[in-house]
Image (cartoon, rainbow, N blue to C red):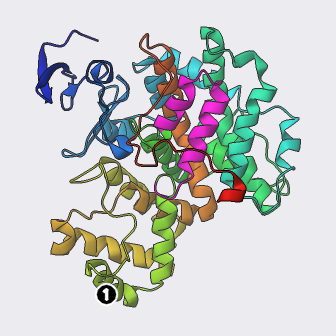
Amino acid sequence: MAEPTKSATLTIDGTSYELPIHTPTAGPDVIDIRKLYAQANVFTYDPGFTSTAACDSTITFIDGDKGELLHRGYPIDQLAAKSHYLEVCYLLLYGELPDAKTLEAFEKLVTNHTMIHEQMHNFFRGFRRDAHPMATMVGVVGAMSAFYHDSTDINDEHQREVASIRLIAKMPTIAAMAYKYSIGQPFVYPRNDLDYASNFLHMCFAVPAETYHVNPVLSRAMDRIFTLHADHEQNASTSTVRLASSSGANPFACIAAGIACLWGPAHGGANQAALEMLREIGSVDRIPEYIARAKDKNDPFRLMGFGHRVYKNFDPRATVMKQSADEVLDLLGVHNNPTLQVAKELERIALSDPYFVEKKLYPNVDFYSGIILDAMGFPTAMFTPIFAVARTVGWISQWKEQLADPQLKIGRPRQLYLGDTARDYVDIENR
């Protein structure tokens, strides 16, 4: 990190403190408060850490006002249009786009590690048959540290690399197995002759009784879903991975922690919530009723899958996802599906109604990804596991970056304590 060239002055009770200001390559300046507690005996208060930078990073940058998402400087729309998921994985992990020979070697490396330890099959069968796939994934990924002892030493660069490849390669297998187990079908082993997205679809939808051919349109749509969700800066699950990692936890435990955080409906469950809303509306003729409710400040109903906490004008991922949604729906011919008819009409209204345009309630990536996954035949319970598969490379990239940071310290957020001050214990007979 370069030495700061300017500073801010904070005055408390007549005493002034100089706080360095760091200027990033993109984004707002950052006031460095690391020494504030030691010098002034005060904390800053920032619930949700929405105004606090907990780290410096070179991986992903988001400009919410411009609707911009960059991975190592490359716009997400260019990557989604010209690249594919494993190439984006390489970019996130190593900082540069690979040449053809390097990419081929990387793809082969990942492909050759997609199988999981055979004894892990027994671990799956320990769950109730109706277990949510995310519950299964949290447990199984955390248990990988019990099966892969040779890649848990975070101080060994080679072991960190092995763990990274294993997690990227095996996460689709684990997610597909969680799905198969939840519907009572036999596990389908990965195939080395299929690309990453096709292999995942094959493991999810193939059965031993007949041959399953992966449609390239569906494979491309799945690859785009993976690509568009690969990383998203310091979000809740990524911050969870970094916080777990700061304690020195092994990589499998850290990623399991990220999966657990992603499970929350406010984070990874947004596309499921959007689809459930479409099903609640039920038919096109009921849309005006729900539009009126959305505009009513006194009604708690909110349109899910519209607008975004970070992107203030538009979600740059949504444009690409809309294209995939149109391709998938055309291929599968499911336009008579009531849920999808509701989705199309809501989309039309959101893009033209002055109320939605003024409040920037545009369809976001979760709106379109839920439609695509539903059309493909995935139940809503699988939406977040698929998100976890995609986000694994982002978590790992951030994890690796943090471990290489010489400024690494164990995370220790502070608090604004509002409880009782010291008081004496009262014996039970006197209470």
Which image quadrant is residue 281 in? bottom left
Quadrant position of the C terminus in the picture: bottom right
Residue 38 versus residue 123 in the image, above or below: above
**Percent x, y of residue 39:** 27, 18
**Residues in magenta, as a range:** 238-266
Q: Is residue 253 left or right of residue 344?
A: right
Graded by Cα atoms within 10 Å as few (under 14), some (14 to 19) or many (20 or more), the crowding at tag 1 reads few
| Residue at position x 68%, y 14% in the image | 153
Q: Nearer the viewer, residue 2 or 312?
A: 2
Say if 374 sits above or below 106 in the image: below
Query: Is residue 163 shown in magenta?
Result: no
- Percent x, y for residue 159? 66, 14
Please state which amino acid type lies under the numbered disc 1. Pro
Please indicate, yes or no, whether residue 383 appears anywhere in the rendered image.
yes
Placement of 182 over or under 25, stated as above or below: below
Residue 245 is covered by the magenta coloring: yes
In the foreground, 161 or 14? 14
Q: Quadrant of the N terminus?
A: top left
For residue 112, side relative to residue 324 (left or right): right
Q: Position of residue 80 (x, y in %)?
A: 39, 41
Question: Residue at 60% across / 20% down in the picture?
Answer: 248
The residue identified by callout 1 is 288
